[in-house]
Amino acid sequence: MIYIHKLLKIIALIFVMVFPLANCSDDSNEVSGNQKSQSCLDDSELSEFELTDEAKNSVQGESIDLVVYDAFLAPEGAFERFKDETGITVNILTTADTGTMVSQAVLTSGDPVGDVMFGIDNTFLCRALNNDVFMPYIPSTWDELSDPLKLDRAGRVTPVDYGDICLNYWKGHFEVPPTTIADLTNPRFSSQFVTQNPETSAPGMGFLLSSIAVFGDDWENFWTELRANDIAVRSGWSEAYYEDFYSKERNIVTSYATSPVAEYIFAEPPVDSPPTAIIPDSCFRSVEFAGILRGTDSPAASALLVDFLTSVYFQEMIPETNFVLPANENAELPEVFNLFLEEIPNAVTISPDLIDMNRNVWTERWTELVLR
């Protein structure tokens, strides 16, 4: 009955989610000088869920739902191993893109459609935290996780992976390839670029933030010129990458720094090096989190799943399945990543609070410039 109840809520949300969510923060035209009175990361009054030995022993036979975005690929055999170790069955509930997943979670805060969410990132983090979506929990792996990735010290969300959102291009298509983000406005690259809508897509939002960081007050002119250069916009990463970029309808796309490694691994016939490359000055640092959804009927089982997602075993599987980098510092990267992953020493980072404070202004202005 619980599963049917959750399924009915998902169906109902299809009709609700066509309307945009109101952002709980104050909008501002200023990147600085108009700070919110309280940070979404303020953990001063939060108490965490404690996973006791008694609770661990009570979860045998439970079934929980892991909510993920559409591009998530479960590592083969991972959740079967989790069931063998804990007796807990994990069902994967796939939504659309990250923005849609977070919007759904906000609409059902306290009465969630699932038990654990994986894939919310730092661009959408404050939207969820301001709406009390997650239950605080500090996993057993906390001390193994990279400290700069622990954006929420209360543990409402736990970092699982990170990566850089970067412009990618097919190396063989261009005699003179783009080398900087500013090159996208050059007529030589007209009708070549596809990106994602920042309102619905984490990569899309990441690239918008990169443009704001790179161009400052001139970011609007940059997007105006992109529109004049026949930019294409899709709702999510999958559509942009597979329908436009992979088919070579468009030869520049907003994706990830790890995407060239994926293209090398899956190339048919095999290649000696990745057929795609990135534009380093376009990159935005993305951190993905998992969190226990507040109102879950299975908090102990959910806590054990967060422990598992951040364990060395799972962390060493995700680079070659989801092409992200592990948050657990004890996890080792596959050799192919050491060979071909380009380091991004100067990836853009912007605080979740600053994103939350300005995102409505930025995305509404982006919509006016690019879509209308």
Image (cartoon, helix red, strand yellow):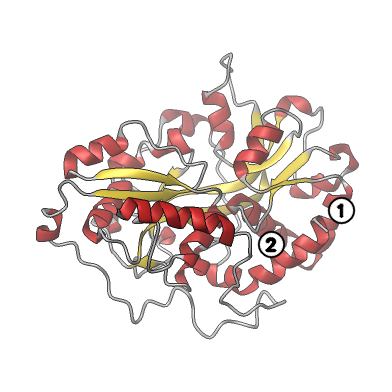
Residue drawn at x 30%, y 44% is 90
Q: For residue 247, which numbered disc appears in the image?
A: none
Residue drawn at x 43%, y 54% is 8
Residue, disc 2 = 213
Relative placement, left or right, of 192 versus 45 is right
Residue farthest toward the bottom in the current orientation of the protein: 37
As measured in the structure, the alpha-carbon distance from the residue carrying label 2 to the one carrying label 1 is 17 Å
Image: 229 above or below 295 = above
Q: Nearer the viewer, mark 2 or mark 1?
A: 1
Q: Amino acid at mark 2?
A: Ala
Asked whether residue 361 is in view, the answer is yes
Q: Amino acid at mark 1?
A: Glu
Relative placement, left or right, of 138 versus 109 is left
Q: For residue 225, which numbered disc appears in the image?
A: 1
Location of the C terminus by quadrant is bottom right
Task: Where is residue 309? Give x, y as percent.
Answer: 32, 47
Relative placement, left or right, of 101 versus 284 is left
Relative placement, left or right, of 287 versus 82 is right
